[in-house]
Image (spheres, rainbow, N blue to C red):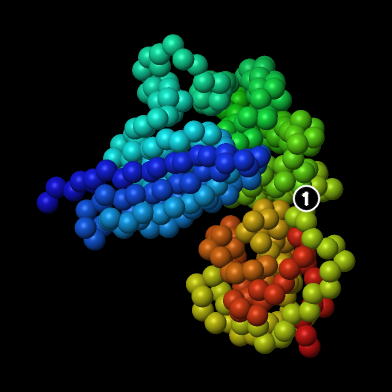
Amino acid sequence: MKTCFNVAKLLVLFWAAGLQVAMASFVLESDLEPKEDVHITVKIYDGLKEDVLFEGPLASGTRKIISTGYQGLALLTFEKGRVFPVILGNKTFVVHIKSRHALPSFTNSPENEFFYKLLTGSEPGPEKYEFALLMIQAKKMLGESQSIRTVQELKAMKDKYHAFVRRHYSQLRYSDMLRRLIAQYFMMHEYVVYHVKGEPATAIKARFKKAVLEGVRQWLQLLKPFIPAHEILNYCVSLYYQRSMVSLAHLIVKKFNQYAYCPGNPDKTVILPKDLAVVDSAGRNRGMLGDFVDKAVVSLVSDECSVSMVETVFKARQLASGKKEGKIIVVPVGELTRGIIAMRRMLVKDNMLFVNDPRGSYIEDVRLPFFPEGAVQK
């Protein structure tokens, strides 16, 4: 049977109505085949923060209405499908989505029509739209940087990235391009040949690490007037943690330790009930937290705080390499998520357990990373 998807429409309405910020209403209207659902996520951006404006299923013949005052680039993501960028401004327009894979079309949005013509290499016409052109310029920069190979080319491209972000931050902040540019900036280090004739391989690795650390320092210097330093550092750390490059991520944390935290009370006292349930990464019961008093290190972790996960994995590796191999018990600040459980995959030896108990969700206002000693009731 031939599979096909009917047209799904996304209506975006903007109005001022006397408000200081123009409000927008997204009307998501599905024309999918009967009994066929599609899952959609709408993401928006502010600096290095990524927020989900809407996430959920769209069944055939249903509609969803989401209101927002956001103006900038939004990403519409279909489950097992493509990601569609859409520019949200202050005018009413319609986004027609034909399927999970086909490019959207627009009614009453000349800026998005202009944007998509540029994206597809078509002639956009005489009108110019500043924000759309900036998004295209950023996209081109991402592609240009993939061809660098020498240290000199790296420096020139890094300077170009810095100048571009410094000049256009006020607009780039409302798109995913700031995150993408910084991610590609650090990826550039891996395109470069650091070898110098006659030097040992250890010198190549040292030169690479030095370049990465200098890159972090430069982004901190450039973005601190706009974004809290701990947010900048957490994002840089996350780029290496997500690729399981924990040692390098830890090196960044160690070098910029004054910014390596997620906000909370640094003097917070945490007392954990001894009967909290403890499980392994497969969800199998391993007893209660009190069973591990004086036998394990406790670590409080949030999957929204990259430095807490990096330092916990690094601590687990240290414990595994000791003469008396110790365990580390992860206590989630909130729910035990798949992201937290995934830390286990970064360990050679299975010495990490997890608290999986709803009573642990009361923990709040804690500055992370945090390895509280004597926190478990005896």
Residue bearing mark 1 = 260
Q: Residue furthest right?
A: 267
The local crowd at label 1, few if under 14, some if 14 to 19, many if 20 or more residues have their Cα within 10 Å, is many
Q: Amino acid at mark 1?
A: Ala
Front position in the image: 29 or 310: 29
Residue 356's place in the image compared with 37, above or below, is below
Residue 50 visible in the shown view? yes
Front position in the image: 92 or 258: 92
**Rendering quarter of residue 178:** top right
Residue 375's place in the image compared with 42, above or below, is below
> x and y percent of residue 226 in the render?
75, 36
- For residue 82, side relative to residue 293 (left or right): left
Residue 176's place in the image compared with 305, above or below, is above
> x and y percent of residue 162 in the render?
70, 24
Front position in the image: 236 or 100: 100
State the residue at coordinates (66%, 19%).
160
**Rendering quarter of residue 240:** top right
State the residue at coordinates (42%, 35%).
93
- For residue 314, side relative to residue 84 (left or right): right
> x and y percent of residue 104 in the render?
35, 35
Residue 151 visible in the shown view? no
> x and y percent of residue 4 in the render?
20, 46
Report the quarter where the C terminus lies: bottom right
Residue 248's place in the image compared with 210, above or below, is below
- For residue 208, side relative to residue 217 (left or right): left
State the residue at coordinates (84%, 69%).
268
